[in-house]
Image: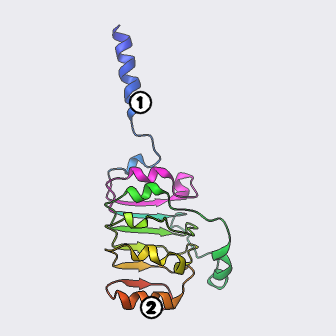
């Protein structure tokens, strides 16, 4: 009987232990993730397990040897070509998030309820495939937003300048200034 009890305890410990890809980061407030280091090509649903994170930076490959590809001269064609990726809804559960950086992840659209990130003050969406004029209404709903980086996406400068006039407290960078 004693061996059976011991076996149940071992099974419950193994079954109940966190078993997601980012378990080593779940108690961190600042998290930097190179997806290629985890063998991933997009943001997994397990991102929602990082409940304590306040600053999150996700990029596709490690910083070592990073270069801009495609070259800036080919940017217009690159923006419209697949693959296109999405931000998983689980990321929107990180309601303590204040700083979010998503660089070079082939993101084309933002979730409809992106404003669930109600504490977001800093957002960097550089080098994605976003047509900002289609997503600007979602960005405007981020009431605490103070800084926005959009370099490497499809930008309508008139939309950005109008937004700046409406809300001069937001610093918007897009490469055209």
Residue 10 lies within the magenta run: no
Q: Secondary structure at mark 1?
A: helix
Give the position of the N terminus as an image quadrant.
Answer: top left
Q: Position of residue 31 (x, y in %)?
A: 38, 59
Is residue 163 placed above or below 62 in the rendered structure? below
Residue in the image at 38% along x and 23% along y: 10
Image coloring type? rainbow
Residue in the image at 41% along x and 73% along y: 123
Give the total number of marks visible in the rendering. Answer: 2
Residue closer to the observer: 124 or 62: 124
Of the residues under marks 1 and 2, which one precedes in the sequence?
A: 1
Q: Nearer the viewer, mark 1 or mark 2?
A: 2
Residue closer to the observer: 7 or 118: 118
Tell me the magenta residue range: 28-54
Image quadrant where residue 139 sits = bottom left
Residue in the image at 36% along x and 68% along y: 99
Residue closer to the observer: 127 or 68: 127
Q: Position of residue 162 (x, y in %)?
A: 43, 90
Image quadrant where residue 105 sits = bottom right
> How far apart, in angstroms, are the residues tagged by discs 1 and 2?
54 Å
Tell me whether the residue at label 1 lies in contact with that at label 2, contact meaning CB atoms closer than 8 angstroms.
Answer: no
Residue in the image at 39% along x and 88% along y: 164
Badge 1 is on which residue?
14
Q: Position of residue 63 (x, y in %)?
A: 50, 67
Image quadrant where residue 4 sits = top left
Could you say which disc has been placed on residue 161 in the image?
2
Q: Secondary structure at mark 2?
A: helix
């Amino acid at each position: 009987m004693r061996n059976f009890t011991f076996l149940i305890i071992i099974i419950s410990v193994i079954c109940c232990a966190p078993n997601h890809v980012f378990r080593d980061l779940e108690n961190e407030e600042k998290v930097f993730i190179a997806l290629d280091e985890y063998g991933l090509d997009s943001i997994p649903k397990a991102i929602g397990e990082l409940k304590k994170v306040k600053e999150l930076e996700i990029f596709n490959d490690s910083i070592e040897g990073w270069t801009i590809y495609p070259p800036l001269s080919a940017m217009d064609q690159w923006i419209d070509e697949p693959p296109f990726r999405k931000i998983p809804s689980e990321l929107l559960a990180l309601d303590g998030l204040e700083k979010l950086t998503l660089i070079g992840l082939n993101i084309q659209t933002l979730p409809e309820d992106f404003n669930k990130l109600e504490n977001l003050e800093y957002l960097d969406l550089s080098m994605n495939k976003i047509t900002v004029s289609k997503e600007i209404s979602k960005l405007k709903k981020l009431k605490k937003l103070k800084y926005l980086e959009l370099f490497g996406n499809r930008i309508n400068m008139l939309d950005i300048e109008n937004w700046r006039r409406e809300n001069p407290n937001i610093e918007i960078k897009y490469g055209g200034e």
